[in-house]
Amino acid sequence: MEERNNLSARSAVLSALLGSHPPRLPARHLVRIGALFGIAEGTVRVALSRMVAAGDLLQDGRHYTLSQRLVERQARQDESRDPHTRPWDGTWEVAVVTAERRAPADRAAFRHTMTALRLAELREGTWMRPANLVREWPETVTAQCTLIDGRPHGDPTPLLWDLDGWAAEARGLERALERADGLAEGFLVSAAVLRHLLADPLLPEELLPPDWPGAELRSRYDDFDRRYREVLYEHLDRLTEGRRR
């Protein structure tokens, strides 16, 4: 987990907005969130200006909100907390890249898309996962791939995901949620849990090892997040009231 003094102003702003519904906060709140980590007000405001210029944020008066690209990231983050799955019949989705002469930037964007769809690459250009998620294939994938539904003779799960590694990290985060003390530490633990849930492959129960901690981590995080958000916003509002006096 990141050390407190290593959190950048940009990371603090993004984490705050990605965790807010709707993802819109006044500048004064973002400045005070930065202050939890010893980040100077001027540094936060410079970061806000640069993020607006880069198209990461939109500014509306004294408020900032996520750009459409980052709203989509928040939607994936929300999906990772409450995934939309369906009963699995043993079918796997396979996407084989058939497009030619793709620029490096296009290949990188494609890999990002496939990872966001929670597919894993068996070998270069061949992506797959169990067909247990409720979602549509984006046009960027259908334009570059041949899509196949199939049933492998063996279980390729160990070749595609490090389930033991994900589970070990999840259990460590459960312990971190229990012992998180103070607003700054709670903020960092919250961001770490959300990042980790984004990496959950969301496999059907039939392919998971015993005692898989995914559901437990989600449940504990939901409880933690409700309590933490109440305390955080009470703190921010109290500071605002204090400055008005």
Image (tube, grey):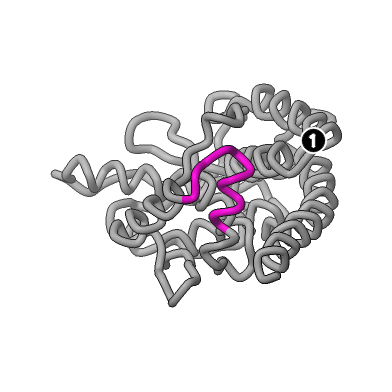
| Quadrant assignment for the C terminus | bottom right
Q: For residue 230, say whether it is visible.
A: yes
Q: Is residue 136 above or below residue 204?
A: below
Q: Is residue 219 above or below residue 210?
A: below
Q: For residue 154, say whether it is visible.
A: no
Residue at (68%, 51%) from the top-left corner?
Answer: 89
Residue at (60%, 60%) from the top-left corner?
Answer: 29
Left or right: 187 as drawn, with respect to 23? right
Which class describes the residues within 10 Å of circle 1: few (<14), some (14-19), or many (20+)? some
Residue at (56%, 47%) from the top-left corner?
Answer: 34
Q: Is residue 241 magenta?
A: no
Helix, strand or loop under label 1 = loop
Left or right: 183 as drawn, with respect to 10? right
Task: Tell me where the magenta segment starts and ends, as one range.
Answer: 30-41
- Image coordinates for residue 52, horizontal then vertical, percent: 35, 61
- Image coordinates for residue 78, horizontal then vertical, percent: 63, 58
